[in-house]
């Protein structure tokens, strides 16, 4: 009797293990396929770019003539000037700063000239805030997202879409960026 029970239990366990391993294998294949498709869709036709931005010094980017608040000199895959037009900003008593606006890039990609517009959202932490809502003191950290305005590109950027993402390097005093461009 014990022998029959042992065989029955062993057979039951074997069936359960086989069924579970088959289902988990099927799920794993489906998950892997789904992840591959998502990655392919997200990167479909996108060109990865990167580089570093710096506050433009006198003579590098004439932001005053452009009517911009400031300019970033872009190096890396994008070479040129990124002119910033601040639309709104706020700073909380804790030093949390938020800014939104538009930017106009004038420069080159792979040696070909062109322009495009972005919208942007900048978030940072500063030592404090002034009474008018501007940041006060040193920046502690900051980052921003810059979606490219579709239909705004000229030259090499004609028909471009995509996004640039910056993360401020406080110690180096620059703005490394990464992004995806779709031509």
Image (cartoon, rainbow, N blue to C red):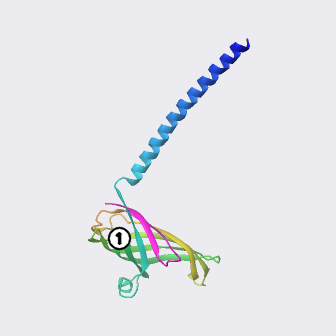
Tell me which secondary structure the magenta stretch mostly adopts. Answer: strand
Q: In the drawing, does residue 26 fall left or right of residue 127?
A: left
Bounds of the magenta segment: 162-183
**Residue sitting farthest toward the right:** 2
Tell me: residue 103, above or below residue 31.
below
Q: In the drawing, does residue 41 fall left or right of residue 115?
A: right
Q: Is residue 123 visible?
A: no
The C terminus, quarter of image: bottom left
The picture places residue 144, in percent across and down from the top left corner, at 49, 69
The picture places residue 85, in percent across and down from the top left corner, at 43, 78
Q: Which residue: 63% across, 24% down?
A: 13
Tell me: residue 105, above or below residue 30.
below
In the image, residue 172 lies in the stretch drawn in magenta: yes
**Residue sitting farthest toward the bottom:** 58
Q: In the drawing, does residue 79 fall left or right of residue 29?
A: left
Closer to the camera in the image, 27 or 160: 27
Q: Which residue bears the numbered disc 1?
A: 78
The N terminus, quarter of image: top right
The picture places residue 131, in percent across and down from the top left corner, at 61, 84
- Crowd tier of the residue under label 1, counting other residues whose Cα lies within 10 Å: few below 14, some 14–19, many 20 or above: many
Tell me: residue 162, above or below residue 92.
above
Q: Quadrant of residue 139?
A: bottom right
Q: Which residue: 30% across, 62% down?
A: 159
In the image, residue 66 lies in the stretch drawn in magenta: no
Closer to the camera in the image, 92 or 28: 28
Closer to the camera in the image, 48 or 98: 48
Q: Quadrant of residue 106?
A: bottom left
Q: Which residue: 61% across, 26% down?
A: 16
Q: Secondary structure at mark 1?
A: strand
């Amino acid at each position: 009797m014990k022998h029959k029970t042992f065989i029955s239990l062993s057979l039951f366990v074997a069936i359960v293990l086989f069924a579970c391993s088959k289902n988990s294998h099927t799920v794993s294949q489906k998950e892997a396929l789904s992840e591959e498709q998502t990655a392919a869709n997200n990167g479909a036709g996108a060109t990865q770019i990167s580089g570093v931005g710096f506050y433009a010094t006198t003579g590098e980017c004439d932001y005053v003539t452009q009517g911009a608040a400031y300019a970033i000199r872009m190096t890396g895959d994008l070479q040129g000037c990124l002119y910033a037009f601040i639309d709104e900003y706020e700073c909380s008593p804790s030093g949390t700063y938020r800014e939104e606006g538009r930017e106009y890039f004038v420069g080159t990609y792979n040696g070909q000239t062109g322009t495009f517009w972005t919208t942007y959202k900048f978030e940072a932490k500063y030592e404090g805030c002034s009474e008018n809502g501007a940041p006060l003191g040193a920046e502690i950290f900051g980052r921003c997202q810059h979606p490219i305005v579709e239909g705004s590109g000229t030259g090499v950027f004609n028909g471009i879409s995509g996004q640039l993402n910056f993360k401020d390097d406080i110690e180096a005093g620059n703005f490394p960026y990464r992004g995806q461009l779709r031509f």
